[in-house]
Image (spheres, helix red, strand yellow):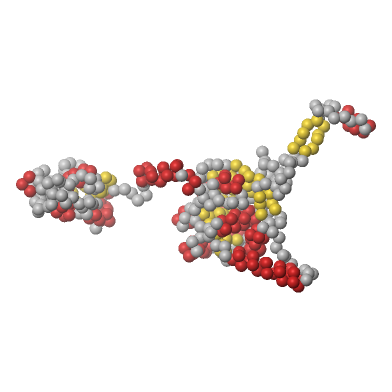
Amino acid sequence: PGREGAEMFARKLGVERCLLVQPSGKRGWNTNGGRKKNGIDDGCADAEDVDVGNAGQHVVETESNSSSDLSPACTSVDDVDDNARPSHPPKDANEALLQGWDLGELLDEASELPHERILKFSDLRDQVIHEIVNPEKYRGAPIPSLPGFTSLIKGFRRGEMTVLTGPTGSGKTTFLGQTSLDLAEQGINVLWGSFEIKNTRLMHKLLQQYMKDVLPVGLANKDMPAEERRRHMEGLTALADKFETLPMHFMKFHGGSDVDDVLDAMEYAAYVHDVEHIILDNMQFMISRQSVGKGSSYDKFDMQDIAVEKFRKFATEYNVHVTLVVHPRKEDEGAKLGMSSFYGSAKATQEADTVIILQSDGKRKFVDVKKNRFDGTLGHVPLHFQRKSGRYTETPEVNVPPPRTTIPTGVSALNRAKKQVNGTARASAGGTSIYHDIRNQHPT
């Protein structure tokens, strides 16, 4: 019946011989209540040419030997109220005739049955205009502690995937811990999948970042009055109680794990806990040789590509944001990483909506946005690590002018050096240059 029946009938005739249409009901209603002159509709067509299914779904045979003038079979119509125009098109031919519709006009004004996977601009017109007029409503969840970074990526949006990389020791887990806390403090449900660091160690780091201060590590062995120790323990317990209220969950995986098991846990968290943001740290530890299996014909690169594809599909289907950490290839220490620095094939960066690299040359550190599918904004923001809080800031802890070093230039440098030795050096405005120490500034 309905659309299903019309499609089945079309398959029997041959899809290439049929055109599936559906009437809108804008035309075809007879003002005389459906009656033609003498109750008979002239221009009758052979009933084999037209089949009208339920729910207004029509199958029109378009074979070359079919009648080109399709009109309803000759039928007399019972009395119909002239003003009883239906609000919806008829569901089938019987209802059309009883209500007084003109089948010929219904077919003439009918539109092609749309495919469920094909859209027109008119289908999304209102949404597109609304996005143009209200861009702020389509931005993602911000990271309040890193406003410059938020201004680049416009927040983390549901249904997208972010890929993050950086050299060993660059602070990827620290960076993600801070962003996850910012999200959780906004009431966004976060799921952590830490395959490299045990959950207890990860939570230790998160507690320090949440407290924004040094934790009382080694409290049990410190030589202090009992009352002071008790106060510290009460403070730590209160911090743990408050941290426990955050909407943050942790997957129970470590090291090599089956990707399908990870996806099953993610699916449960998305359904039961309404998780909106998932962090997977990291790809290489998750997909180890042990998880591939001895009898597998896939190598590690194939497994990584398959996993990336599955995580991308999960983010779209479950409308969650997935952040995936991928280690870089082996590069020279201090070398600046790029899009081709990700370990494995280009699958990860191709599937990702946002690509982020934590750059570090040993002296300075910054977060580099290399891909931004949302609005194309790229750039970098400096990161300054605060050891006390275990967090990053975008400005130095003490905001002082950068130190300057005076460097002699030109052939007069030797003469000035001699004068300085003899104690007769004099200031010369044209003989020196001012050099700025850029170690704490943005990279060029």
Q: Nearer the viewer, residue 16 or 41?
A: 41
Q: Residue at x 71, y 67 (%)?
A: 232
Quadrant assignment, res 111? top left
Can you say which quadrant of the picture contains the C terminus? Answer: top right
Quadrant assignment, res 212? bottom right
In the figure, is residue 389 to the left or right of 99? right
- x then y, percent, for residue 283: 58, 56
Task: Give the answer, above or below, for where 294 lies relative to 3.
Answer: below
Quadrant assignment, res 151? top right
Q: Nearer the viewer, residue 298 or 303?
A: 303
Residue placed farthest to the left in the image? 38
Q: Residue at x 93, y 32 (%)?
A: 423
Number of numbered discs on residues: 0
Q: Residue at x 55, y 51 (%)?
A: 142
Residue placed farthest to the right in the image? 422
Q: Residue at x 12, y 46 (%)?
A: 32
- x then y, percent, for residue 326: 59, 53
Q: Nearer the viewer, residue 203 or 362?
A: 203
Q: Is residue 133 visible?
A: yes
Q: Nearer the viewer, residue 288 or 210?
A: 210
In the figure, is residue 325 to the left or right of 20? right
Can you say which quadrant of the picture contains the N terminus? Answer: bottom left
In the figure, is residue 9 to the left or right of 265? left
Q: Is residue 296 visible?
A: no
- x then y, percent, for residue 109: 23, 43
- x then y, percent, for residue 253: 58, 65
In the figure, is residue 103 to the left or right of 368? left
Task: Give the answer, above or below, for where 244 lies relative to 73.
Answer: below
